[in-house]
Amino acid sequence: MNRPSGSATPGHGRPNSRAFLFLAAIILVWGSNWPIMKIGLQSIPPLTFAAVRLGTGAVCLFAVLAVLGRLRLPERRDYPVIFSVGIIQLAVFLVLVNLGLSRVDAGRSAILAYTTVLWVTPAAVLFLGERLTPRKTAGLLAGLAGVGVMFNPLSFDWDDPELLLGNAILMAAALSWAVAILHVRAHDWRAQPLDLVPWQLLAGFVPVLLAALWFEGDEPIRWSGTLAGVLAYNGPIATGFAIWAWVTVNRDLPAITTSIGSLGVPAVGVLASALVLDEALSVTNLLGLAFIVAGLAVVSLEPGPGGRAFGS
């Protein structure tokens, strides 16, 4: 199978150290972004926010490719992953996240949106032939325990229809992300991820822009220095860099490892939301955070076939 130079073959070889570094950066960037997005949605409608984020991210990465001399039309064989990532992982996910985040606290939104692991793990075993080793199983169980503790359904207001709708929307966002993870992992790559990401962003931007113009064309944007900072962070950093890094991680690491690793995002999101938005940081949140960190540590230190663990 033709794969980009330096990429890993699913299920073979020692975990890629660069991919784990990218995963750590993604956890920090996306985790910190939950309270930032919540602040931004006070000034800009959700579909418009998603369109601006995708558009600015695409412009930034098209400029990077032009400077590097790598800006070219993608090969037809990469069209499926361009549209699956662009529409399912980017457009659908971001729109659903913004709609859910408008109704739900930032910390809880981060937890629900990253229940992706619930969908990816069984699907990766069934469809991609990945194996749940004892260490991955332990990491998965620890991570899911952390999400369950942090979600704390006993404290949920089941009589609030808007809150119920927001939670359902965020769960749907997690499912859409899971579908994209599996396709990225299974795709026979012809180009490097950086060469495709701006095209993926463009594929997601067009339908979201049309939807924003149709549904939110008359809604105002309340411009301010705060909103400008939110958009500057969300375009080049949380979208341009982070999406490229995420596609790289998906390509180089097993889908199960990637999905479990993503549980670090809601952990950072809960902490960041407590610091920035003064959302409650309860004992259950701290206990859930401890479970998630333990799960991440177990998975990231799994030895490869040669017996060496990541970081050794």
Image: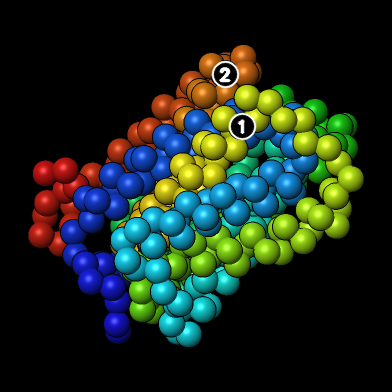
Q: Residues within 10 Å of mark 2 (few under 14, many from 20)?
A: few
Please provide percent x and percent y for residue 133: 31, 57
Image point 46% across, 42% down: which residue? 237
Inspect this view and state whether residue 12 appears: no
Distance in Å between CA atoms under marks 1 and 2:
17 Å
Image point 62% across, 41% down: which residue? 112
Using residue 135 as the reference point, say whether residue 303 is left or right of it: left
Please provide percent x and percent y for residue 234: 55, 40
Using residue 3 as the reference point, say whether residue 95 is left or right of it: right
Secondary structure of the residue carrying tag 2 is helix
Q: Amino acid at mark 2?
A: Val
**Vertical comparison of 7 with 221: above or below:** below
Image point 34% across, 58% down: which residue? 67
Q: Earlier in the sequence, mark 1 or mark 2?
A: 1
Using residue 227 as the reference point, say whether residue 196 is left or right of it: left
Q: Residues within 10 Å of mark 1 (few under 14, many from 20)?
A: few
Quadrant for the N terminus, please. Answer: bottom left
Q: Amino acid at mark 1?
A: Ala
- Name the residue carrying label 2: 276
Q: Residue 228: which disc?
A: 1
Quadrant for the C terminus, please. Answer: top left
In this view of the protein, which residue sits in the foreground, 297 or 46?
A: 46
Secondary structure of the residue carrying tag 1 is helix
**Vertical comparison of 177 with 230: above or below:** below
Please provide percent x and percent y for residue 155: 71, 24
Q: Quadrant of the rendered structure where residue 206 is? A: bottom right
1 vs 2, front mark: 1
Q: Quadrant of the rendered structure where residue 211 is? A: bottom right
Please provide percent x and percent y for residue 16: 23, 56
CB atoms of marks 1 and 2 within 8 Å: no
In this view of the protein, which residue sits in the foreground, 114 or 144?
A: 114
